[in-house]
Image (cartoon, rainbow, N blue to C red):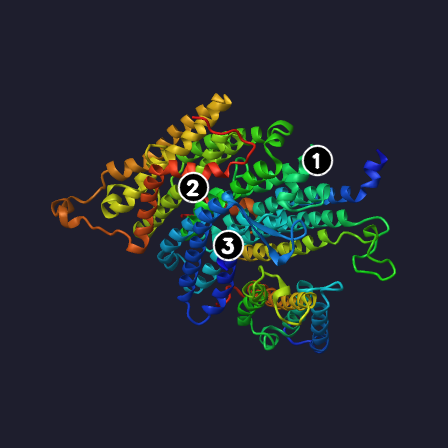
Amino acid sequence: MTRNEDDPIITLISSIVAPFIMLFGLYVIFHGHYSPGGGFQGGTLLAAGIILLRLALGSELGKKQFPSRLGIPLGSLGVLIYYGTGLAALLLGGTFLNYAFIPFTRLASHNRYWGILSIEIGVGLAVMAVLVAIYDDLLEGEPRV
Amino acid sequence: MIPTNAPALPPLLFLFTGLLIPLAAFKLRRLAYWLALAATAAASAVAVSNIFRVLDGGAIHYHFGGWLPPIGIEYVLDPLSAFVTSVINVIALIVLIHARRTVEADLPEGKHVPYYALVMLMMAGFNGIVVTGDFFNVYVFLEICSLALYGLVAVGDRKSPVAAFRYLVLGMIGGCFYLLGVGFLYMSSGSLNMADLKAILPVLGARPEVIVALAFMLLGFGLKMALFPLHGWLPDAYTYAPTATSSLMAPIGTKIGAYVLIRILYFVFGLGFITKTVPAATIIAWLSAAAILYGSIQAMAQDELKRMLAFSSVAQVGYIGLGIGLANAWGLVGALLHILNHGLMKACLFLVAGNFRMKLGHSRISRLDQEARRRMPWSTAAFTLAALSMIGLPPTVGFFSKWYLAWGSIRNGSWVFLAVILVSSLLNAVYFFRVVERLYLKPADRPPEAEKSGAAARVRSEVGASMLIPTLVLAAALLAAGLLNAFIVKGVLLKILPPGLAGMNP
Amino acid sequence: MSDFLVGHYFYWFVFLLMTIGLFGIVLKKNLIKKVIGMSIFQVAIILFFVASASKWGATVPVLDPKLGAADTAKYINPLPHCLMLTAIVVGVATSGVAFALIISIWRRFKTLDEPELLAKMRHDPD
């Protein structure tokens, strides 16, 4: 960490491992509602994959995949996906977050299944973006908004 | 759709706007303020209409996700939550109108958009705490509003990160204690719903875990409410925060803690538990009496206007705590009325402090003199009216809440509390008249040649309309609410009282 | 008496952790150590909830076809676990805000030691 030249071992291993971390993160998000996992856990893994690249490759190269200015807007977008699912339920006749009213399929229980999946995706996106934004902010200074 | 979804609308509106502002104002920065103002106006309208809806039709229950309690989370709109949401939303609206210019002046350009987003999240948290009927949901919204507040306090001047850090550590401990209390309650009863626990607790009786749960929950929200001796974060946080933050935080933040205390003590645990089984009401009453005296005495020693108002807030929260701790109808009505009154008074005072900072560049009492009054006559007038109200002169609104509290103490036979209320009014007079005397009577030192061109030298530099009108509206509201206080008490507050309390015989 | 001490051993452990956390917040002078103490205190409360959910001889709360759904004593209580997911996220967010504030304090006052910081604040002209 105190050397300035790039270490080829770190560069190579992190570039190989990071996609697998992110794939595992996606798996954890999608299997959250009937096995251990969920939005927050998967989002943290996705963020770990991104931060690994930032740590290993340095500031400029590590930010090519996920630029820092995307952090807060993507976080808002993720929570708005969550909110939008709930709002759709409210506008379609039920109370807020009552997924049975969103017409994904014809059965009410299947609608709840797809509703929960939709909010987990929103949460995963939000957590990933916000954790990366916290990392960037602590390292650089004031974020540009 | 609005009537059926009415309980959930205020927090949902604020949450939506708080999430929308970083996205929508990405390109167009000025949009952030107008979105925030629109959301607050809409939420105030819903909240005020909710009072009428609830007074006509009875309590409204809203089940999130369609799951019925006690499995699901429900939002309950009864007269108490409708009253408190209206108070906080309307005061927030008036303060937000004032905030535009001070935010432009105090904060660097890149921070405006996140500032308004955090303000929206804070209001969402406040509204959520008030409306929800589930104990853990209170914790969730408590953390939402606390996190937003830490950020809002920290963007001020040089010393604000230290004040925000102290607030963060203490606020976190308070939240954790509350969570611990909820945990004990859940473990002994198996339910997190407030109405359900109200039915279960008499069956459980006075077990150790229930008493400890009550103690932890009171500690947690006593810290949020800044009840003496848990007030340590308050003076620094109010002083070093930017003007808009102090004006939003001071009238509203501590009231939320008071609301939760009323809800837990009177509506869940019940009057018998808090007076006979555990002397919780007595402890709160004595701590509040200490808070009143401590806050007033400390306020007399301060030089900075905002710091003086912060210690004055500690004292005023003591009044609300005293009303809660008296455990009779008069005391509770006094506490509820003081929630409204102190909100109006403190908002007006902090707005005037913001006006002074804007035009005079400082808000130090020792540097105020007649020059300040000549330059800003309207702000000074508003300050004087609010000061008279804090001291408790009729027909301003501050008199009536002290009247009810005094009657409550007399009913209980607690002459010590009556003496505390009267002595503290005298102490309030001391520290407020210190400022008023300087503004009206202390001659400004001018060079002699300026004396000759007397009229031309008087420069009126009052703040602009967007800052002056909210100040004057609040000052006028102090008089109006005072004159109309019988309507407020009979129409709204008497309906809030839980059935266990004896009526208010004149 | 032995059930009070040995039967509830996990709650004694949680109590010890909470004390360590509070000790850190109150008695340590460095701001980062205070944040560490706060974090330990929060984790202790999370462990408290999780411990209250477990039952002797029970398994994870995922429906097992062999055990069936009738007897709830065979599955641990999942509700405190869900509540603690929220509490963990709150802890993460608060630690993030705390560290951002610490960086801001460092930039302005160049010290993270609390007595030194308070002395600097007292002499700071504002």
Which residue is more in the foreground, B354 or B22?
Answer: B22
Q: Crowdedness of circle 2 by 10 Å Cα count: few (<14), some, many (20+)?
A: many
- Residue appearing at x 54%, y 38% in the figure: B262
- Disc 3 marks a residue whose amino acid type is Ala
Which secondary structure lies at badge 1? helix
Q: Which label was assigned to residue B340?
A: 2
- Residue appearing at x 62%, y 42% in the figure: C26
Q: How many marks?
A: 3
- Disc 2 marks a residue whose amino acid type is Leu
Tag nearer the camera, 1 or 2:
1
Distance (Cα) linking label 2 and label 3: 22 Å
The chain under label 3 reads B
Kindly identify which residue carries mark 1: B203
Which residue ends up furthest to the right in the rendered image? C66
Q: Which label was assigned to residue B476?
A: none
- Residue appearing at x 45%, y 33% in the figure: B334
Q: Earlier in the sequence, mark 1 or mark 3?
A: 3
Question: Where is residue A15 shown, x and y percent of the image?
Answer: 69, 77
Distance (Cα) linking label 1 and label 2: 36 Å
Which residue is more in the foreground, B294 or B37?
Answer: B37
Quarter the C terminus of chain B occupies: top left
Question: Where is residue A5 shown, x and y percent of the image?
Answer: 65, 76
